[in-house]
Amino acid sequence: MDSGSDAPPLTPAARRIVDAAEELFYEHGITAVGVDLIAEHSGVTKRTLYNRFGSKENVVAAYLAERDRRWRSAVRAAVDASGSAEEAVTAPFEALRTWTSTYTRGCAFLNALAELPDPRHPGHHVAAEQKRWLRGLFEKLATAAGCPEPATLATRLFVLHEGAVATEPLSLGTVTAAADLARELVRAAVRG
Amino acid sequence: MDSGSDAPPLTPAARRIVDAAEELFYEHGITAVGVDLIAEHSGVTKRTLYNRFGSKENVVAAYLAERDRRWRSAVRAAVDASGSAEEAVTAPFEALRTWTSTYTRGCAFLNALAELPDPRHPGHHVAAEQKRWLRGLFEKLATAAGCPEPATLATRLFVLHEGAVATEPLSLGTVTAAADLARELVRAAVRG
DNA sequence: CAAGAGGTATACAGATCAGTATACCTGCGA
DNA sequence: TCGCAGGTATACTGATCTGTATACCTCTTG
């Protein structure tokens, strides 16, 4: 279930394929990007792509898993860098601020869920799991901060986080607004 | 800018096309559904489809505009049915609860923005406009309820609303959680 | 009754889709 | 030195994509 390092190491060509897929899928959408374009963009033969991944579905899953891996490590770094248990609860919002300064096309996982409604699609599972992990992380952090009813707070913070990342492309200042409100909620829950 | 009734009335065939498009686009995604399928599903010739709409892009825009129209009228009804100005501010969350009991594939507009990154796509504009309208509605309602700093409250409610609708397909209870928190925020802002 | 709007039926063009077939090259480790 | 894993190059299949061409039908309305 964890998006850890137990994944098989990628061959050089596979690495380039995943990198190209990340750019193209995120920027233009998954269904809109064909395997020919990915192969061309990564300087790799389509034959190699299919030798490594077997299908487009699996390339999509690899793209999402790779992004999830990078995103989780960014979130963990933000949590570790926070000065207190209370501060740690809203650390994902700090990570989000940095993250959205680079990626302005919203959340790759929400976007993927929008495009891949079929739960049997391997990419669907990766995206859904990323969301459940964040929801669970908020609960762990809330518990560690000594918050009563950590489940309630966690769901609220999760909703705020997802609302922020989903509406970020609209440039309405939602990321900052969500972070501010999140801090207020945590302060009230811990100290109140 | 308003999604009002100034739109030209649809011919019977066009009506069926938009209805079929709504079902298919929402359920399976926009890029994944072809015009042939829409024509077949609506019992209409592809020729007619192109005579009425000219392109798939325009069918997409019509689908989103129609959905926007229906959704706005549901929200307005909820606002009108609320007992007080304070209650009216969170009325969209009540409408959302009813709405998501029918539609469990998330927000058609967020999904559309995920699939249509190009702002020149006519559907992109319709979807983005729907979001701005809601954000503006929250601000109007907050102002009417006598809330100081209505802009801040409006953005917060907007983020909550979008987070709820975006994560609703995950079945994590986010719609209820967002509605509860929204009521608390409004109460605190108006009475506090 | 004539004309046009709305629609049907069918066939097609040209591009792109995911995925496969065949044949060859290169470096490395047993 | 032999074999194989990883990769290249190119051509192909059959389906599906958006959009068009041609021809005909059936109301309604002036």
Image: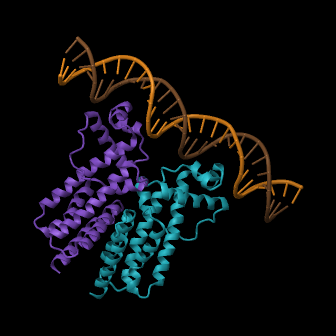
Chain colours: A cyan, B purple, C brown, D orange
On the rendered image, what quadrant is the C terminus of chain B found in?
bottom left
Question: Splitting the image into 4 quarters, where does residue A129 fall?
Answer: bottom left
Left or right, A114 with reference to A5: left
Name of the residue lying farthest toward the left: B83
Query: Residue B112, image x and y in percent?
Result: 38, 53
From where the camera sits, is residue A67 visible?
Answer: yes
Which residue lies at the image location 37% right of the left edge and 71% below the top edge? A175
Position of B124 relative to B86 (above/below): above
From where the camera sits, is residue A116 visible?
Answer: no
Left or right, A127 with reference to A47: left
Left or right, B27 with reference to A77: left
Which one is nearer the viewer's eye here, B179 or A136? B179
Question: Splitting the image into 4 quarters, where does residue A52 fall?
Answer: bottom right
Exactly how many numbered labels are in the figure? 0
Which residue lies at the image location 33% right of the left edge and 79% below the top edge? A150
Query: Residue B163, image x and y in percent?
Result: 33, 66
Query: Residue B137, image x and y in percent?
Result: 22, 62
Question: Splitting the image into 4 quarters, where does residue A139 fall?
Answer: bottom left
Which residue lies at the image location 40% right of the left edge and 49% below the top edge? B121
Query: Residue B3, image x and y in percent?
Result: 24, 51
Left or right, B146 with reference to B36: left
